[in-house]
Amino acid sequence: MDRYRRLRETALVLFRKCRESECLSMGMRSYADLADELKPAGGEGKPDCRKGCSHCCVVHVTVLVPEAYSLASWAHENCGRDFYEKLKEQAARLRWVEEEDRPLMYTPCIFLGEEGECTVHPIRPLLCRGVTSLSEKMCRDAIAMSALGEPISVVMDLVQREHYDKAFKSAAEGIEKAGGDARGYELTWAVLKAYEAILSEKEDNTPA
């Protein structure tokens, strides 16, 4: 079976009648694990990405609803109340920013740690998994030049990029067939909405 057909059918099974936060979160993590498993061998060159290298972590990231719930669930379990306040502030600041203008603000991802590490790396979004760079300097220069209105290309593993782009699309197609919301949303805003839904669920399940 074609790997992307398999991913699409897996998404359909995972997200059919799946509306609760735990179901969405665990379903997305299972789907992402399968996407990793089905990743084809990479192209030429070795990615220069490593822990603490976060030049690309200021760009717009689109996530699906189950991805937002996976991230929000992690945050609810691992972060304090101050995270929620920070999340609300950042979502409001970025809400109407155009994708191409996001690097100009140089606002780090809400999940970027103090040492430039991705705190949610094992469950990071599909589209983040597809982003690599064969040169840290080139990546750094690309972000700097985009702020000056002079974008430059970054040499990356295009095989990996294409795979996760297709995995994202396959997930969306499966979610749509399952009757769910298959649209993509800006990460910060989507995680905020998922986080608030989780808080609401917790309140509803609290004994009177």
Image: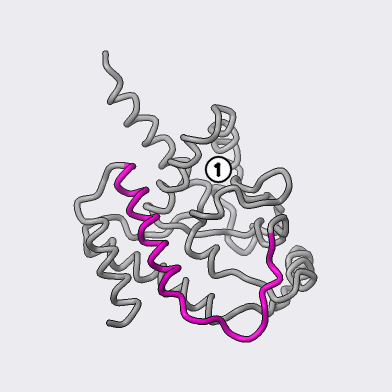
Residue 73: percent from left, percent from top: 43, 41
Q: Residue at x 37, y 55 (%)?
A: 28
- The residue carrying mark 1 is 91
Classify mark 1: helix, strand or loop: helix
Nearer the observer, 11 or 103: 11
State left or right for residue 189 relative to residue 52. Answer: left
Residue 157: percent from left, percent from top: 60, 79
Above-or-below relation of 123 to 7: above
Image quarter in which the N terminus is found: bottom left
State left or right for residue 131 relative to residue 74. Answer: right
Q: Which residues are magenta?
A: 21-50
Quadrant of res 58: bottom right
Nearer the observer, 151 or 200: 200
| Amino acid type of the residue that numbered disc 1 sits on in the rendered structure | Ala
Above-or-below relation of 51 to 208: below
Residue 101: percent from left, percent from top: 65, 60
Does 109 lie within the magenta span? no
Residue 80: percent from left, percent from top: 55, 29
Nearer the observer, 56 or 160: 160
Q: Residue at x 67, y 51 (%)?
A: 117
Q: Quick one: which residue is furthest to the top in this view?
A: 208
State left or right for residue 134 relative to residue 190. Answer: right
Residue neighbourhood size for the residue with mark 1, other residues' Cα within 10 Å, grouped as few (<14), some (14–19), many (≥20): many
Quadrant of res 196: top left
Above-or-below relation of 65 to 41: above
Q: Quick one: which residue is furthest to the bottom in this view?
A: 44
Q: Residue at x 51, y 65 (%)?
A: 127
